[in-house]
Amino acid sequence: MGDTIEKRLATLGITLPAAAAPAANYVPFAQTGNLLFTAGQLPLKDGKLVATGLVGRDLDTAAAKDAARQCAVNVLAQAKAALGALDRIGRVVKITVFVASTPDFIEQHLVANGASDLIVEVLGDAGKHARSAVGTASLPLNAPVEVEAVLEVA
């Protein structure tokens, strides 16, 4: 499966970045038993946020969906850093997608599809997961989206 995952990433034009270091007093991932929990991942690319602000005011659903996709790339980078190889992922159990949005914005689930779709594209059936999409008033660094994941280690 590892070869397949790498091929899927290449086909999608994705090179996993180095896993981001924690910005405060926490670890970027923690494993207990066969579960790996990632810290929330922002839509960082080349050290910069791909978008900022509130969804529904500063960016639309499509732009936020792209940001969520970048968050998922960073979740996979953390998983690779934790496990050494993505083929050690038995399955993605659940992701939580936080969307910094205006009070009247109601498309958090569509924004979350950016992360969900990427994970399934890369991992296939092992990427099918439970999910929560949560609207919030703000996120760190004025990011529009943050994604965390729970993964089963094979």
Image: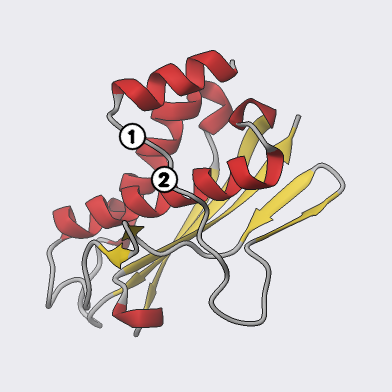
Q: Which mark is residue 78?
A: none
- Measured from the top left, where is residue 108 in percent x and y? 31, 62
For label 1, the residue is: 14
Q: Residue at x 41, y 17 (%)?
A: 7
Residue 120 lies in quadrant = top left
Q: Residue at x 35, y 61 (%)?
A: 44
| Front in this rendered view, residue 3 or 39 | 3
- Circle 2 residues within 10 Å: few <14, some 14–19, many ≥20: many
**Would residue 69 be found to the left or right of residue 153 on screen?**
left
| Front in this rendered view, residue 142 or 137 | 142
The amino acid pointed to by label 2 is Val
For label 2, the residue is: 73
Q: Secondary structure at mark 2?
A: helix
Residue 28 lies in quadrant = bottom right
Quadrant (top left/top right/bottom left/bottom right) for the C terminus: top right
Pointers 1 and 2 in contact (CB under 8 A)? yes
User: Is residue 107 shown above or below 151?
Assistant: below
User: Is residue 89 shown above or below 65?
Assistant: above
Q: Residue at x 64, y 33 (%)?
A: 91
Q: Secondary structure at mark 1?
A: loop
Query: Is residue 144 visible from the viewing direction of this image?
Result: yes
**Would residue 78 be found to the left or right of residue 6 on screen?**
right
The amino acid pointed to by label 1 is Ile
- Measured from the top left, where is residue 8 in percent x and y? 39, 21
- Measured from the top left, where is residue 104 in percent x and y? 20, 78
Which label's residue is closer to the chain start, 1 or 2? 1
Query: Is residue 139 visible from the viewing direction of this image?
Result: no
Quadrant (top left/top right/bottom left/bottom right) for the N terminus: top right
- Circle 1 residues within 10 Å: few <14, some 14–19, many ≥20: some
